[in-house]
Image (cartoon, helix red, strand yellow):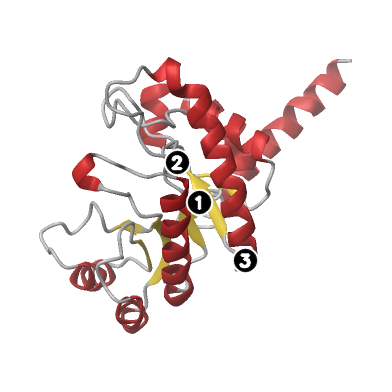
Amino acid sequence: MAPLRFAANLDWLFAERSALPERLEAAARAGFRAAEVPWPFAWEPALLRAIADRAGLGLVLINTPPGDQDQGEKGLGAVPGRQHAFREGLALAVKYAKVLGCQRIHLMAGRVPVGAERAAVAAEMEATFIENLRHAADILAQEDMVGLLEPMNSRITDPRYFLTTPRQAAAILEKVGRPNLQLQLDVFHCQIEEGNLTQNLQRYFPLIGDTVEGLGWLRLYWESRDQHQQHQHQHRC
């Protein structure tokens, strides 16, 4: 059975160190061999890559830029009227990812506009997201990279975030239909929105792009269980 492997999310961990280069070094000292660096854009990518290489740390995930945070933006992928800014941000993220040796980019959906009802803008936001995701898939395919969609719960974390459940993300991925776009499944968000983690992990495993290698043992368990149940059914017949 392959061991579990963990990556330090440096947006959350080692927050007592304000500078990202210091957080990279702290993650390595704590025993991590991989890190997510959601917001690397304030630092030169070559500097971050040099520090990570020196520390023996692989950089496995970055985000697309959030947009105008002073205006409350948190990603632009599904925000109508912000397609050009999303594409500029994607180009920047790809530039960084290439230097960092990072193969995965989280394509942030963004928030429902202030004052708008979610139901009233859902169709337009989904259409915008699909348009941007198809563009992103083409760009990422040229670099042999994967784009990830991460649902965030609307009950605790962000009431206005557009992409809230794995079910919604899976439906959008099916409509986009590109193999290099996958699901980034955060079990914290999944449990809050849908619960039933075991069956949901099993249901969405074919779409998951950020944890499949580390949880390969769980896939083997489910496959062996399914085979056992089929054998029992055939035996009873």
Q: Which mark is residue 144?
A: 3
Left or right: where 13 falls relative to 67: left
Q: Which residue is mark 1?
A: 210
Q: Residue at x 37, y 45 (%)?
A: 75
Tell me the kind of residue under disc 1.
Asp
Q: Are marks 1 and 2 in contact (CB under 8 Å)?
A: no
Q: Residue furthest left?
A: 16
**Whole-number angstrom distance, CA of label 3 to CA of label 1:** 15 Å
Q: Which mark is residue 150?
A: 2
Around disc 1, counting alpha carbons within 10 Å, would you say few (fewer than 14), some (14 to 19), or many (20 or more)? many
- Label 2, secondary structure: give it: loop
Q: Are marks 3 and 1 in contact (CB under 8 Å)?
A: no
Left or right: where 235 falls relative to 222: right
Q: List x then y, in percent, for residue 139.
A: 59, 61
Left or right: where 79 falls relative to 142: left
Q: Residue at x 43, y 39 (%)?
A: 81
Q: Residue at x 35, y 81 (%)?
A: 46
Q: Nearer the viewer, residue 139 or 191?
A: 139
Looking at the rendered image, the disc whose residue lies closer to the viewer, 1 or 2, is 2
Q: List x then y, in percent, for residue 154.
A: 33, 25
Q: Are marks 2 and 3 in contact (CB under 8 Å)?
A: no
Left or right: where 183 falls relative to 81: right
